[in-house]
Image: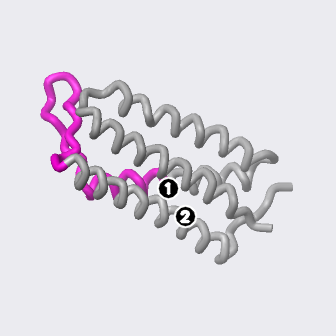
Amino acid sequence: MTQETSSAPVRIDRIKVVVTAVVAALVVCALGLLVLDHPLTVAGAGKGPDTEVTYGPVIFVSTLAGIAGWGLFYLLERHTRNGRRTWTAIAIGVLVLSLLPVLLGDAEPGTKVTLGIIHVLVGTILIVGLRNTVDS
């Protein structure tokens, strides 16, 4: 039988994890902008325009990653025997894949480092945090 994880304390803990990941991403973004003293700009795909990474996209993508991770975790722990283990493997895989555009993209080294730190920090907070919110 699978675990039920719909209790209010678990939901509140998971909300806290997502909010923590978003705030951490914003802090790193702000520090990166402060240290680099120029915008975080990534070259556009093909001949497209360059993209400036600002606080809005950082909030949106971090929140989206948190909600997607939470939703998948909920489904797997509810409908599979080894939901937590399966989710963790998938989440680590997604984190590694999310680093590919950062590593292979066309951007200044400081921008790549800042974005890489954001990816790793958000992923780590979500993976560790959500894993530890199992309803007993």
> Which one is nearer the viewer's eye here, 54 or 77?
54
Please identify the quarter of the rendering in which residue 71 is found.
bottom right
Nearest to N terminus: mark 1 or mark 2: 2
Question: Is 23 inside the magenta-drawn segment?
Answer: no
Which amino acid does the dot numbered 1 rest on?
Gly
How far from the left and from the top, in percent, is residue 94? 53, 37
- The quadrant of the image that shows the C terminus is bottom right
* Residue marked by disc 2: 17
Q: In this view, does 67 lie to the left or right of 14?
A: left
Q: Which residue is rendered at x = 43% and y = 59% of the image?
A: 24
How far from the left and from the top, in percent, is residue 77? 72, 53
> Which one is nearer the viewer's eye here, 77 or 47?
47
Q: Give the range drawn in magenta.
A: 37-66
Which amino acid does the dot numbered 2 rest on?
Val
Circle 1 Cα neighbour tier, 10 Å, few/some/many (<14 / 14–19 / ≥20): many
Q: Which residue is rendered at x = 34% and y = 44% of the image?
A: 114
Q: Are marks 1 and 2 in contact (CB under 8 Å)?
A: yes
Q: Is residue 29 left or right of residue 131?
A: left
Q: Which residue is rendered at x = 23% and y = 55% of the image?
A: 34
* Residue marked by disc 1: 66
Question: Is 42 inside the magenta-drawn segment?
Answer: yes
Please identify the quarter of the rendering in which residue 51 is found.
top left
Estimate the spatial distance between the alpha carbons at disc 1 and disc 2, rounded to whole Å: 8 Å
Q: Which residue is rendered at x = 15% and y = 29% of the image?
A: 48
